[in-house]
């Protein structure tokens, strides 16, 4: 999970980084300032934005429209309580006045991090995968996704009938999707449920075939044993029912 801090105060960034590290090493603090604007395509739905009210006055208007559009959770550090009206159109999780305690901010970030962890650890909560597009969000049922393929500066999402290119990385995707997916190659994350065949392609990789599609993904032979051994019992039983074809 990322915590973006919109400020030009180094002190704020330093303290919030310490707070985040004390909660979990999985929380990454990223500073947004006049030299480093928000990059819309890199934002995940569970990312948190902490806005220094003074930064909003100086530079933040450039990012306001992005946060409003994406409905990101925001925490406001107010310079003056009356300024909360500036943020009425944003998804404000909490706001603090100038006399706030850092520990109060830590409690909020801790709670939001726990919600984030619950959302990715409880497979029952996985319903679909969402990506941001120019026209809004696009949603994919996980069962419909065959694989994710890494390309230069983007990822291709392959479904049975279509392909979609998004600004993302496999490293970011793999931590947000169910256990039915696995990183089987530097360039591929595949959906175990949709595999119907595995073929010996060359000395380094197997080719993978998917139900209802002519698309092919690849699995590194060095990852084969690890990938199979990481399958849960339920998935192995499912494979036996379906009958994987080793060509």
Image: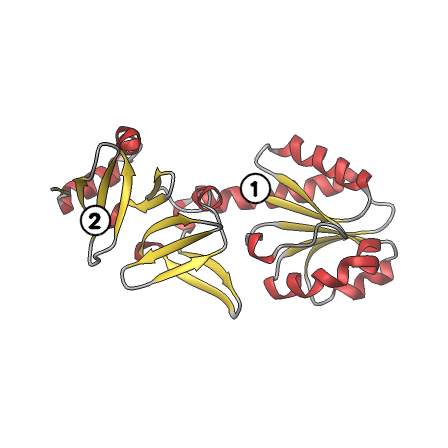
Q: Secondary structure at mark 1?
A: helix
Q: Quote the CA–CA distance across marks 1 and 2.
A: 37 Å
- Mark 2 sits on what residue? 209
Report the disc number at residue 103: none
Image quadrant holding the N terminus, namely top right
First along the sequence among labels 1 and 2:
1
Q: Residues within 10 Å of mark 2 (few under 14, many from 20)?
A: many
For residue 10, above or below residue 93: above
Q: Residue at coordinates 36% horizontally, 41% vertically from top-left?
A: 179
Task: Locate residue 115 relative to residue 74 in the image: left or right.
Answer: left
Q: Residue at coordinates 33% horizontally, 56% vertically from top-left?
A: 158
Residue 101 visible to the viewer: no
Question: Along the line of sight, which residue is nearer the eye, 228 or 219?
Answer: 219
Residue that lies at the very extreme toward the bottom in this rendered image: 135
Task: Locate residue 245 relative to residue 170 in the image: left or right.
Answer: left
Q: Residue at coordinates 45% horizontally, 49% vertically from top-left?
A: 152
Q: Which x, y percent locates residue 134?
A: 53, 68
Task: Locate residue 139 relative to residue 43 in the image: left or right.
Answer: left
For residue 119, above or below residue 225: below
Q: Which x, y percent locates residue 188?
A: 35, 44
Task: Locate residue 86 relative to residue 242 in the image: left or right.
Answer: right
For residue 70, above or below residue 36: below
Q: Quadrant of the rendered structure where residue 89 is? A: bottom right
Q: Secondary structure at mark 2?
A: strand
Q: Which x, y percent locates residue 201?
A: 20, 39
Q: Quadrant of the rendered structure where residue 231 is? A: top left
Q: Residue at coordinates 61% horizontally, 46% vertically from top-left?
A: 112
- Mark 1 sits on what residue? 114
Residue 174 visible to the viewer: yes
């Amino acid at each position: 999970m990322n915590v973006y801090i919109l400020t030009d105060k180094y002190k704020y960034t330093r303290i919030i980084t310490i707070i985040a590290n004390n909660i979990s090493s999985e929380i990454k603090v990223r500073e947004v300032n006049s030299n480093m604007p928000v990059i819309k395509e890199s934002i995940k739905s569970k990312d948190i934005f902490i806005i220094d009210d003074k930064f909003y006055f100086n530079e933040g208007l450039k990012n306001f429209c992005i946060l409003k559009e994406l409905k990101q959770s925001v925490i406001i550090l107010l310079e003056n309580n009356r300024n909360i009206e500036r943020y009425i159109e944003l998804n404000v999780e909490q706001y603090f006045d100038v006399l706030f305690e850092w520990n109060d901010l830590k409690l909020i970030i801790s709670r939001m991090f726990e919600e984030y962890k619950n959302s990715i650890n409880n497979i029952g909560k996985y319903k679909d995968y969402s990506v941001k597009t120019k026209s809004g969000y696009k949603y994919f049922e996980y069962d419909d996704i065959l694989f994710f393929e890494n390309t230069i500066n983007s990822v291709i999402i392959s479904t049975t009938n279509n392909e979609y290119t998004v600004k993302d990385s496999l490293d970011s995707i793999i931590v947000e999707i169910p256990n039915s997916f696995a990183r089987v190659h530097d360039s591929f994350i595949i959906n175990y449920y949709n595999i119907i065949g595995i073929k010996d392609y060359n000395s380094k990789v197997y080719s993978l075939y998917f139900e209802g599609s002519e698309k092919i993904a690849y699995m590194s032979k060095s990852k084969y044993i690890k990938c199979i051994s990481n399958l849960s019992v339920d998935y192995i039983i499912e494979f036996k029912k379906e009958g994987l074809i080793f060509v």
